[in-house]
Amino acid sequence: MQHLDAAFSALSDPTRRAILARLASGEATVMELAEPFEMSQPAVSRHLKVLEGAGLIIRRVEGAKRPCRLAPQAIGEIDQWLNWLREAMAKNYDRLDDVLADMETQEGKDRP
């Protein structure tokens, strides 16, 4: 979970999330990624730099192009952290269910 803070910071921006959603369907160049946005390619490149720094995307050099793709390891780390949080919350709800069941049982015993 080396890049978790940087990853969540990068994900806080809707443009970056949209770029990641686009990359989920496959590799793309900066020009392809910039098409749906009303911003310059340098602005999109700055978003890509943040995503790359957070470990969420990988860029490679292919002649004059630098295609981008998702970095599965970073996405896996986020998923692992969210699963841990989901499991902790489920355990808390289970304990709350047990307390409520005990309270109901106790109330039944106290009634005449």
Image (cartoon, rainbow, N blue to C red):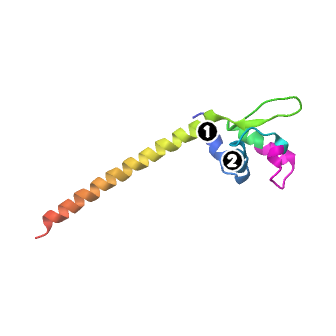
- What's the residue at 71%, 50% (across, down)? 18
Q: Is residue 26 magenta?
A: no
Magenta part of the chain = 32-47
Q: Is residue 78 visible?
A: yes
How far apart are the alpha carbons under marks 2 and 1? Answer: 12 Å
Total marks drawn?
2
Classify 10 Å Cα crowding around label 2: few (below 14), some (14-19), many (20 and above): few
Q: State the quadrant of the C terminus.
A: bottom left
State the residue position of label 1.
75
- What's the residue at 88%, 29% (across, down)? 63
Of 42 and 71, nearer the camera is 71
Q: Indicate the amino acid at tag 1.
A: Ile
Tag 1 secondary structure: helix
The answer to whether residue 60 is above or below residue 13 is above
Q: Indicate the amino acid at tag 2.
A: Ala
Of 1 and 73, nearer the camera is 73
Main SS of the magenta segment?
helix
